[in-house]
Image: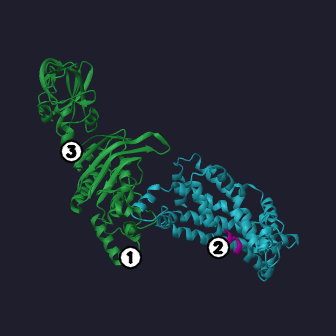
Amino acid sequence: MSVHIEKLIRRAPGNPDRILLDQVSVDIPDGSFVALVGPSGAGKTTLLRSIAGLDPHSSGLLTIDGRDFAELTPRERNVGFVFQNYALFQHMTVAKNISFGLDVLPGRERPSKAEIDGRVKELLELIQLPNLGNAYPQRLSGGQRQRVALARALATNPKHLLLDEPFGALDPVVRRTVREWLRSLHDRLGLTTILVTHDQEEALDVADRLVVMQDGRIVQDADAGELEAHPATPFVMEFLGETLTFRGTVSGGLFLPETPHVVPFPVAIDQDGSAVALIRPHEVRLTADAGGAPVRRIGSRYGLSRLAIDLNGRIVEVLGASNEQIFPSGAKLHIDAARLFRDGALLSMKDGRHAAAA
Amino acid sequence: MAEATLSVRSRTSDPLPGFRLALFSTLLWVGLIVVLPLTALIVRPWQEGLGAMTMALHDGRMFAALRVSFFTAFIAALINVPVGLLLTWTLVRVQLPGRRIVDALIDLPFAIPTAVTGITLATLYGPQGWLGKPLAHLGISIAYSTAGIVVALMFVGLPFIVRSVEPVLRGLPPEQEEAAGLLGASSWQTVWRVVLPSLLPATVSGFGLAFARGIGEYGSVIFIAGNQPFRTEIAPLLVVVRLQEFDYAGATSIAFILLVASMLCLAGVAMLRRRVARGLITGVN
C-alpha cells in the first residue's frame, strides 16, 4: 500500500494564478512514517488534504497501490484522517463516534452490532480510554479528544493514517507521551503514516523521513541524519534548528569569514567566490585567545553552558560544555563543522569531511 | 440573609460597572415591560369571581378557537421546518447570485405590518386571486379555510426557523462533514447523521418561536381565515370579539387560557430542545 505522487499541482480555488502546490512529487512506501514539515503556508496541509482526496488537484498524478486516486471511492482509498481540530461529532457519544465508519457501511458489508461493539471496546482500550465510551466529546480533554479522533480514523482498519497537526492543541508533556504512543501504534499496526507538523523537533522525534516544504514546493525529502548533514538549502538548515550564519569567501581552498574572531578553515571546494557558512550553536568550538572576542556565560541548556560572544558588535550565542574553561581574555571561534552554501544551494564538498562532522 | 448579603457583595468585584444599578434597572425594566402586564392578565379574569372563568370554560366556541389556533400554528411551524432548513442551507452553503437579496427578503415578514400581510395573502389566495383562481379550478380552496390560516402562519413563521438555524449552520466546522465522508458516509448519511443532528437544537428553538408566534398571530390571519366560529375562528380573534361585546371577563379568560397553554407548549419545546441538545451545548450532558 504505497502512495505515489507525481508533479502534483494545485491552484487556489477562484484564483488560478496562486499556486498552492507546485510540481510536488513524493513517494511514500509501505509502512513508512513520513512527516510533512514547513512553516505556515508552505502547503503541507494542502498536500495532506490532496492525498486524502479532500481537495482536488489541478494536474499531476496521485496513485495508491498503483491505482489512480480519482477513480477510488473514499472507502476504497482506505485512508484514516485525523483533523487538526479533531472534528468529532459533538452530538454522538465517544463510542458512536468511533463506530461511525462501521455504522455507515451498507447493510451487507456492515458487521453485526455485537461485532461493532467489540471493535469499539477494542479501540477504546487501544487508546487507553476504556471507560469513556458513553461520554460526549465536549467532556473530554484535548488529549482524550485527539485519541478518540484517532480511534475513529482507525475503526475501519485503514492502511494509511493521515494526521494534520495532531499534537497542536496539547500541552508539551502530553504531547511527548502521545507522540511516542502514536509511533508505537504505527509500528504495531503496520500503518503507513503521514503527519503534518510545523514543529520540526516533533517531526525529527517521530518520523522516519521528513519532507520539508516551502512555498508549495518540496525543498528536501530525506531522513533526519541526511537533512542535518546535507541540508539542500539554508532554509532547511534554519528550519530544523537554531543556526548561526557567517558570510565569507572561498579562496584557494580556504573559507575566509568576514566576521572578526572567526578562524578561517580549509574546504575542498574548487570554485572560489562568496559563500555562506551555516552551523549549529553546539558545533562551534572555542579556543582561548588573548585579544579574541569577549565571552559571557548567559545560561545553560542540557548541561551545556550558553555563551554570548561579542564579535565586534554582533552577538552570537553558542553552546559549550559547562565545565569548559571561562575565556577571561576572549576567544576565537572555529566553525569547521559548518555547511557552506552559495546562491541558496549546498556547495558540493569533495571529501564530505564537513558533512561527517555534523 | 447573611448569605444573600455576601453574594451581593462578592458581585461588586464583577467587571460589569455598577452591578447594583444594572441589576436594579434590568429588574425594573423586565418588571414593567413583561411581568406587570402578565400579572394583570393573570389576575384580571378572577376579579369578577369564579363565575366568568367557569362560563368561559364551558364555552365550546372558545375551545374550538383554541383548537384552531394551536392546530394551525403547529402545522405551519412543522411545515416551516423542512422549508426553513432548505432555505437556510441554500443561503449559507450555496453561492447563488442574489443571495443577499434573498437574505434580506427573509426578514420582511418581521417588518411588514401583519394586516398588510393578511390583505395581500387574502387577495392572492382569494377566489379571484393569482393563486386562488387556478387552485379553485383544481378544487383546492386556500382562502377562508384552515389551509389559509396555515399559509398565513407559515409566512410569518419562516424567518424564525431560518434565523435560528443560520448561525449554527454557519458555525458548523466543515471538517465534520469531511470526516464523515472520509469515513465512508454517503452525502445522505452525512446530512442525516452528522449535519441535521447538529442543527436539531436550533431547529427546535426556531420551531418553538414560530409556533408561539403562530398562536398569537392576529393581523395576517383574520383576512384570509374567513373567521367562521367553530371552524376558522382563531383564539386571538375571539378575544377581540369578546372585547367588542364588552365581555371583558370572557376576553381575559380566553387570554388567560391562551397564556397557560402557550407556556405549557413552550416549556415542552424547551424540554425537547434540552433532550436533543445532548453533547452539543455545554451543561446539557
In which quadrant of the rendered view does residue B237 lie? bottom right
Where, quadrant-wise, is the N terminus of chain B in this rendering? bottom right
Magenta part mainly helix, strand or loop? helix
Measure the C-alpha gap from mark 1 to mark 3.
Answer: 44 Å
Res. A223 mark: 3
Relative to A191, is B138 on the left or the right? Answer: right
Q: Residue at x 12, y 19 (%)?
A: A289
According to the picture, the residue beneath numbered tag 2 turns out to be B264
Q: Is A76 in the magenta?
A: no
In this view, the residue farthest toward the top is: A291
Q: Are marks 2 and 1 in contact (CB under 8 Å)?
A: no
Measure the C-alpha gap from mark 2 to mark 3.
Answer: 68 Å
Measure the C-alpha gap from mark 2 to mark 1.
Answer: 46 Å
Q: Residues within 10 Å of mark 1 (few under 14, many from 20)?
A: few
Amino acid type assigned to the residue bearing label 3 in the image = Asp
Res. A222 mark: none
Amino acid type assigned to the residue bearing label 2 in the image = Leu
